[in-house]
Amino acid sequence: MKREKIIIIAEAGVNHNGEFQKAIELIDVASECGADYVKFQTFKANQLASEKAQLASYQKKNIREKSQVAMLKKLELKFEWHQKLIEHATKKTINFMSTSFDLESTNFLVKLGMEIFKIPSGEITNLPYLRLIGGLNKKVILSTGMAKLSEIEDALEVLINSGTAKEKITLLHCTTEYPAPMNEVNLNVINTLKKVFKVPVGYSDHTEGISVSIAAAALGAQVIEKHFTLDKNLQGPDHKASLEPDELMKMIKSIREIEMAMGSKIKFPTPSEQQNLIIARKSIIAKKNIKKGEKLTKENLDIKRPGNGISPMRIDNILGRKASRKFMKDELIEI
């Protein structure tokens, strides 16, 4: 059975830094690198966080603002930009996605005709939000960072009971830290989620570099999501943990190679191997000149390349027989 193509989501997120032109450039990069989707984040800062919401430790290292709201206000993807960005993505032959973080933004994306709704890890316990998205009966990608199996089960139940068919839901394993420590990645969870929930499973990668995304592809992840930026040195919360364009291109190329290399589950000689069977395998040959009618023994037989004669696996059936004709040294034995 042919494996389905891995969907690669280039996560632009908030790496546009609140600048329309940077958002355009991020779409260009994602397209040039061969991603299937370019994904942004749609939110209203004052609906996403309260004035008292503190910054995460990784955010404190990379921004000047003192609160989440102050930071988020500078990172909003303005509603009026969306249609132009969608049109630009279409022109660049890449699919546009955006993750909504509040009800107003979700309804806005509905009006734009979004076909896939990506639920971020932080919203997996947001009941009204889950009900709204579940009621759309659209394709859903649910990130599971910070979640226990029971919380994933609860979120799936809400989505399904609200109207989304189970077969439309994909889970993403994720470690919600930027960058995620290697010893907390737990890629084996991909197979756990598949086994427990019987839905497609992918991986949202917050580690540094590209090796973990490639490994996730080899483990059977059906979606790979990875943050990217125009420049890691830009001011903002996510740039340092994102890939630069050359890294994104290398990651996508490597995933496509792994995808091809995974191939079939059936063990058989491949077309390219077929031509090497004769060269690499061996046959039963004459160790020295053998007269017609002479008894075939360990003393006058040998096993050498090429492999287009009698297989050495049949040596026990050959020993003791009489030579059917005269054989010269190194000639393939025939019976």
Image: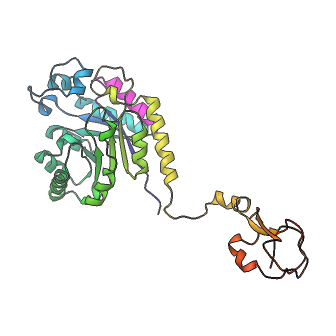
Q: Where is residue 170 in the image (x, y as percent from the top left)?
A: 29, 52
Vertical side of 238 occupied by 288: above or below = below
* Residue bounds of the magenta highlight: 13-35
Vertical side of 27 occupied by 115: above or below = below
**Residue name at image x 40 percent, y 51 percent:** 219
Horizontal side of residue 223 vs 3, given as left or right: left
Which SS does the magenta portion mostly show? helix
**Residue name at image x 22 percent, y 22 percent:** 60
Q: Position of residue 87 (x, y in %)?
A: 36, 36
Horizontal side of residue 176 vs 243, given as left or right: left
Vertical side of 301 occupied by 274: above or below = above
Front-lying residue, 67 or 196: 196
Horizontal side of residue 99 vs 296, given as left or right: left
**Residue name at image x 83 percent, y 67 percent:** 287
Residue 98 falls in which quadrant of the image?
A: top left
Q: Can residue 256 be seen in this view?
A: yes
